[in-house]
Amino acid sequence: MTDGSSPFVQEIVRDLQRTQARISPKFFYDKTGSTLFHRITTLEEYYPTRMERAILEKASEEIARSIGECWTVIEPGAGSCEKAEHLCRLLRPRSFVGVDISADYLADGVERLRGTLPGLSVHAVAGDLTEELLLPPDLPMPRRTVFFPGSSVGNFEPDEAVALLSRILRLLDSDGLLLLGVDLQKPIDVLEAAYNDSDGVTEAFNLNILNHVNRLIGGNFRAADWLHRAYFNKERSRIEMHLEARRATAVAWSGGRRRFKQGESIHTENSYKYSLESFRDLLERAGFDRSEVWTDDQGWYALFLARPGAARKSQRRIAS
Ligand code: AVI
């Protein structure tokens, strides 16, 4: 169990006591959760990974040309580093920095990358994307590309996404770039099937958060007491995932407890689905501009390449 005063423990306990209980989706990613998520990305119903890969492959020459010379690729949420491998082969940077909350999972990914791309200097940083990202201090500032694939930006509330994009902007010089994947709006049946797969992998992924939380807060959640729920909230343009109590359930952890009525839920994730315009707006609010975008033929998924905006450039000129 983690120390009771740790910020993670405090956050989980506070969130469990809200009227609408919640657990931050960052706690999905212990080693088991990261492995389950990797399985999700291979499922027929889960289109984002496949679409993103297809766009990256189809537009790779154009993307490489738009990026130009790149010295460092930085990937927040790098996980298994598989996508990074593809991009590093394309851009041939000197260094790669993978950042992930699951240090174990990242360590495996980074090791594999070192094996497959021996000339690349590879760094692993254990980090939480909801905080300032701390990079190795000797990493050169110019010619960085932050690669944020997988539409993970959709798991942040829009205002938090702007804050995250602003933190990313602070990692970049005026010649830096951000290449990121964004899941777009599409028919509801396609969206809901992606989060309710027929093999039950997403269900296992959602339930596994309880095991992780038990270890972190010394809790006694029983996965068998909870149901996986995932549905599209049209008003807010997001998939919501919840764990719903199958029956009245009491849960205890070191220092606290809570009763859940039958049907009461713990909100575990939002996955926002944007339009191209609404996402461009977020980029601009964060200080990026002149973005290029590539999509699939149906317009279901987008890869944005965004540059620091003019305001940001003049700020740096004044500072330097
Ligand atoms: C990581 N993230 C982009 C995934 C998503 O689609 O929001 C997490 C996920 N949750 C359930 N399935 C996949």
Image: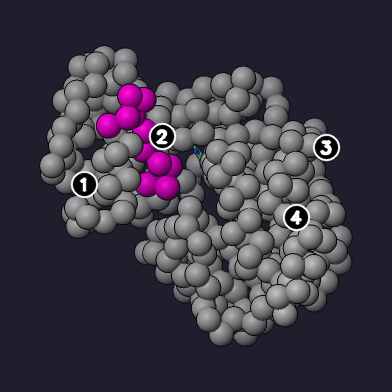
Q: Is residue 319 left or right of residue 311?
A: left
Q: Which mark is residue 268?
A: 2
Q: Nearer the viewer, residue 208 or 267?
A: 267
Tell which circle, 2 or 4, labels the residue nearer the N-terminal end. Answer: 2
x and y, in percent, of residue 255 in the image? 13, 42
Q: Is residue 301 visible?
A: no
* Label 4: which secondary element: strand
User: For the residues marked 1 and 3, what is the alpha-carbon distance in whole angstroms?
Assistant: 46 Å
Q: Which mark is residue 297?
A: 3
Q: Are marks 2 and 4 in contact (CB under 8 Å)?
A: no
Q: Residue 183 sits in which quadrant?
A: top right
Q: Is residue 317 left or right of residue 121?
A: right
Name which residue type carries label 2: Thr
Q: Residue at x 27, y 47 (%)?
A: 10
Tell which circle, 2 or 3, labels the residue nearer the N-terminal end. Answer: 2
Reply yes or no: does residue 24 show up in magenta. Answer: yes
The residue at which mark 1 appears reads as: 217
The residue at which mark 4 appears reads as: 288
Q: Is residue 254 left or right of residue 99?
A: left
Quarter occupied by the N terminus: bottom left
User: For the residues marked 1 and 2, what is the alpha-carbon distance in whole angstroms?
Assistant: 16 Å
Tell which circle, 1 or 2, labels the residue nearer the N-terminal end. Answer: 1
